[in-house]
Amino acid sequence: EYVFDHGWADAYERAGGRYYPKLQVSVPFTPATGPRLMVRDGVDRLRAEAEGDVEAKREVEKRQLQRELEPLGLTFEDIRADGHCLFTSVAHQLALRSGEQIQRGAHMEIRQIATTHMRANPTQYQPFVEGDFEAYCSRMASSSDWGGQIEIQALADALKTPIEVYAANQAKTTMGEVFGEQGLEPLRVSYHRQYYALGEHYNSVVPVGKVGAAGRAGGL
């Protein structure tokens, strides 16, 4: 759009200069596709290559993990990537163990179990938390902050059950291994580094014959 500001033009000409119209251009800030103005050549191509690279890494990781799970008669069920994936995975495992269907909002109950145990045993968990421990527990209890190794250990201790973590090209990790000596069937989750562009992700690991038996966890 050409905009001619006559007031500024008259003032500039009286001062002995020549005033030229201004060219105003707007560029969308949304991630819309299409050609761009004043953008280095190849940016869209580089973006597409980066997204494709994430997808390729994801597929490689999935295939490798599946190869490791198959001899054990296991596979993994997709869990929704919403920040609650670890807690939904554990809720899905508990539902599978009890023969029930996973309930909507079950991930928040699992968050409460983990953080209640952490608060009751601060000396065991506080050294592994950066910053204010109570603020961390509050966020973990009520938000969609990602859970990780600290929360897995807390859940294993609180539920008094072993939790196995499977990852591609990595030996299985077991939290709460001592509880396995009591004959308890472990809860199983898979850890993915490349599953989504946002980063780390957890899924629920299930026997091949029980896929879908505890409901559609990916939609909760």
Image: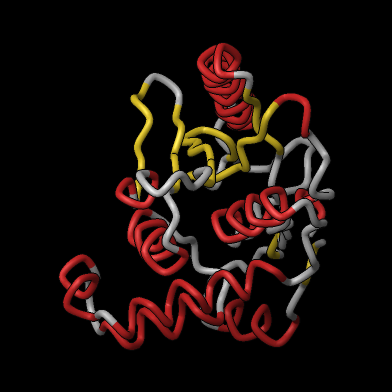
- Where, quadrant-wise, is the N terminus in this rendering? bottom right
- Residue 50 or residue 204, whichever sits in front: 204
- Number of marks in picture: 0
Q: Horizontal and vertical percent for residue 208? A: 72, 24
Left or right, residue 19 beside residue 183: right
Can residue 27 be spotted in the picture? no
Above or below — where is 187 with respect to 152?
Answer: above
Which residue is located at x 57 percent, y 69 percent? 110
Q: Horizontal and vertical percent for residue 157? A: 36, 64
- Where, quadrant-wise, is the C terminus in this rendering? bottom right
Left or right, residue 179 beside residue 10: left
- Residue 163 or residue 160, whichever sits in front: 160
- Residue 213 or residue 166, whichever sits in front: 213
Which residue is located at x 44 percent, y 47 percent? 163
- Residue 53 or residue 205, whichever sits in front: 205
Above or below — where is 134 with respect to 125?
Answer: below
Q: Residue furthest front?
A: 182
Left or right, residue 106 beside residue 212: left
Which residue is located at x 60 percent, y 62 percent? 84
Q: Horizontal and vertical percent for residue 149? A: 35, 54
Q: Quadrant of residue 155?
A: bottom left
Above or below — where is 68 with respect to 174?
Answer: above
Q: How is the image coloured?
A: secondary structure
Which residue is located at x 75 percent, y 81 percent? 6
Can residue 149 be spotted in the picture? yes
